[in-house]
Every structure is written in C-alpha cells, then in structure tokens.
Image (tube, rainbow, N blue to C red):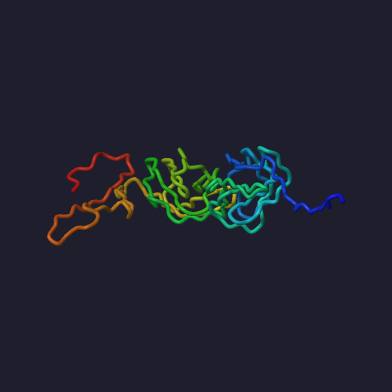
Amino acid sequence: GNPASLTFPVPYVKVRGTCGQPTLNSIWPTWACVGTDVPVTLMGGGFVAPSALIGTQPLTIHCSNQHTIIATLPAGLGAGAHDVTVVNQCASTATLPAGFALYTQPRILGIRPPEGNQDVPTEVTICGEGFAPGTIAYIQVSTGTIPLENQAPFGDNCLVGTVPAGVAEGEHTIIVQSPCGTATGSYRVFAPALNDDLWARGEELWVDPSVCARQDDDIDIGLIVHRRGGKPPLQNVT
C-alpha cells in the first residue's frame, strides 16, 4: 500500500531578529541628589527591547527605541559614581563606566588656609564631601553673604576661591551651597599688623628619596610654603 506519513512537532524557537551588540554613548542628566525622582535619557544605538541598570538596580523604562531610552532612577541608590548598563533582549550589553553620580548634602572637611590678612585677597581651598556641580561658596559678613571671588572646582570634592580684601577682622562663616544642601565652616580674618602670612599643607611635606632610603644615606626634606601675598619680599628665609 501507500507509505505511512509521520508528523513530528517542531520545537518553539525564539527569533531574535537583528538583536546584536548595543552601544551606550551618554546619559542625561549625568548626576542627581540622593533621594530625588529624576527622569534620565540614555542615548546610543542598537537598542532592541532593552532593559537598563544603574549599578545593579534596574531603571524603570517608560519608552525606548533603537537609539534612546527614557527611564526613571530606582529608589534607594547611594551616593557616588555608578555604572550605567543597557541589556538587549538577547542579553548583549553596553556599559557606561561611572556614567551617573549621586550626591548627598555637602559637608566641609577643611578650609586651607583657615585664616587670611584683612588687607589683601586670600585664595582658599575648601574640601569636603557632596560638592555637586554648581556648588558655590560664600563668606558671611555684617551685611549678609558675598560669594568668594574667582571660584573654580578643584578635583572631585574641593573648590578654590578668593576671600576679598577688606572683610572685617574676626571669625567668619564660610557657606558652601550645593543643589543638594548647605554646609558651613569657619574662617578667620586677621588685622594687617599681624605678620603671620606663611602657611603650608601637611601633604606638601616631601622627602627625597621618597622610598628605599638606607641607613647613613643623605635624605632631603622639604616643605612647600605658601604666602598670602601683599607684603614686601621676605629676607633671609631658610
């Protein structure tokens, strides 16, 4: 007779189409304050039904296409720099290392120098924690607050600015105002008659050679000393 025909079930195969390696070029904004509900936009290419992570926590995605993801940060993220990762439906990934930063309320850990001469401008370096972009430093005076002059970021958590000449003698409050909060520190202005115009940072003490010195070797030791300025040249400094 006729040959028998047999039918076999075909196993389900998930077709991934053009899913491949995504690219992640940027995230905007690049920072936020801890605890804020911030929408972010991830930009790149090759996104296919993507998910996204900040650190190890998933972002809430509102919409996406091949080049853009619009999402919201998860709650509970801590301060610091976090990697941002896009994961395609076929598990291929792209990561932006330290692509997003979260800042806490600022805290001042040091003001150097901690004092300055009343009759000359004095450059100060203020260092601490939580100095988010847009942080500004002020000095409290009798009429209110005035911003330090010539302010600029210095590293991740420091800023440099100048206390103007003419600020009244005595103790003053330095105020650091960031988008995430406020911190205060102390600064003293001394009278022009006081001639203590030299200062140094502890980390600027140096030795040469710095390592592997042997017994009876000659070692050079030095300290970088700064002047507050505005006075005649020093004589016979050793």
Residue positioned most to the front: 1
- Residue 144 visible: no
In the figure, residue 150 lies in which quadrant? top left
Give the image location of residue 113, x and y in percent.
38, 50
Residue at left offset 65%, top offset 47%? 88
Please name whichever residue, 33 or 13, is drawn nearer the observer in this view of the structure: 13
Residue positioned most to the right: 1
Residue at left offset 26%, top offset 39%? 232
Give the image location of residue 192, x and y in percent.
34, 45
Give the image location of residue 25, x and y in percent.
57, 39
- Residue 73 visible: yes
Is 128 placed left or right of 36 in the picture? left
Residue positioned most to the bottom: 215
Residue positioned most to the left: 216
Please name whichever residue, 135 or 199, is drawn nearer the observer in this view of the structure: 135
Is 60 placed left or right of 127 in the picture? right
Please name whichever residue, 176 or 235, is drawn nearer the observer in this view of the structure: 176
Up-down relation of residue 225 to residue 233 (above or below): below
Give the image location of residue 109, x and y in percent.
45, 56
Residue at left offset 31%, top offset 50%? 199
Is 179 placed left or right of 160 in the picture? right
